[in-house]
Amino acid sequence: MSALLFTFFVSDGSTAEMPMNHIDMNTIEMSDTEKVIERSESSIGRTINNYRLVTQDGEHLMFHSLKGKIVLLDFIYLDCPDMCIMMSYSLQDLMDKMDPSLLGKFVILSVSFNPIKDTPEKLKAYGLDFTSDFSNWHFVTASLNSIADMVEELGFTYKKDDDGFSHLNRLTLFGADGKVMKHFYGTDFSPKEVEASIKDALAGNLVPTKFSLFLNKVVLSCSYYDARNNVYKTDYLLIGTYIIEYALILLTLLLFFREQITNFFSRYKHKSDKSHTG
């Protein structure tokens, strides 16, 4: 049975269909990690609208013109004191370490969600700190309406506060067909992991599955909201605690069923020996 849908209008006059259980950004708090995760993951498999973006050179760039290439997209704002800069440095590292054969087959979009302040001139000045080649890495923004609609479609969450914005740190991978395929969370993206995902997407092997979504939720559930810096950070102590707990559970089960496991392998070995001698 198909899911019930509702429709909202986007700035270019087209329409986008969203699930009835879509979580409105205005109804959740940044500290509600579970809701932020659920909202983010709801965008997997979605094809977003053809937004008209404005590049660091003041030129228009239609989002659908990038179809045929893999797109890596992150949301930033230029007054961000640290985390947006860390993501940009991580993307710079990714570009430096990327397999040369992939250059030209993917493009990075760093999208400012603060278009009132982040003009093309400011975007270019910011971008030059990370790249001198804007052919593969665009620093863009759009109209307020387009940004609002884009954020909704992609399940990104941010909130205005006294010092700027609280926001989720995330890199999104689009397939060559324009569908959202995967999210990478945090500020330090593994070049090997991203490169492998790009290659899988180009080969048509990157398919979002319940297992990958489950892993994303596990990773993010081991994060906490740092209200002072307005970001999510990985709670490595909690991850370590979970690993130890599950290891102890596994060890307990192995000890409890030790006799049954031993008997099973003994019978298997006995049958195998008989088949070889018979």
Image (spheres, rainbow, N blue to C red):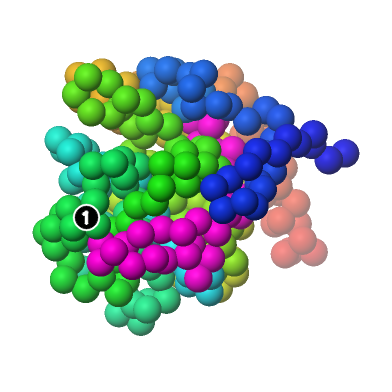
- Quarter of the C terminus within the rendering: bottom right
In the image, what residue occupies the spot 74% across and 64% down? 277
In the image, what residue occupies the spot 62% across and 34% down? 262
Q: Secondary structure at mark 1?
A: helix
In the image, what residue occupies the spot 15% across and 35% down? 81
Closer-to-camera residue (274/38): 38
Could you tell whether 95 is left or right of 148 in the image? left
- Magenta-highlighted residues: 37-65
- Quarter of the N terminus within the rendering: top right
Q: Is residue 63 above or below residue 41?
A: below
Q: Bin the neighbour count of mark 1 within 10 Å (Cα to Cα): few under 14, some 14-19, many 20 and up.
A: many
Residue 234 position within the rendered picture, expressed as x and y whole percent measured from the top left: 30, 30
In this view, the residue farthest toward the bottom is 101
Residue 269 position within the rendered picture, expressed as x and y whole percent measured from the top left: 67, 49
Q: Is residue 28 visible?
A: yes
Could you tell whether 66 is left or right of 77 in the image? right
Residue 38 belongs to magenta span: yes
Residue 46 belongs to magenta span: yes
Closer-to-camera residue (184/230): 230
What residue is shown with label 1?
123
Amino acid marked by disc 1: Leu
Residue 60 position within the rendered picture, expressed as x and y whole percent measured from the top left: 39, 66
Q: Is residue 181 visible?
A: no
State the count of labels.
1
Could you tell whether 24 is left or right of 87 in the image? right
In this view, the residue farthest toward the right is 1
Q: Is residue 242 above or below residue 43?
A: above
Closer-to-camera residue (141/179): 141
Residue 248 position within the rendered picture, expressed as x and y whole percent measured from the top left: 44, 21
Residue 193 sits in which quadrant? Answer: bottom left
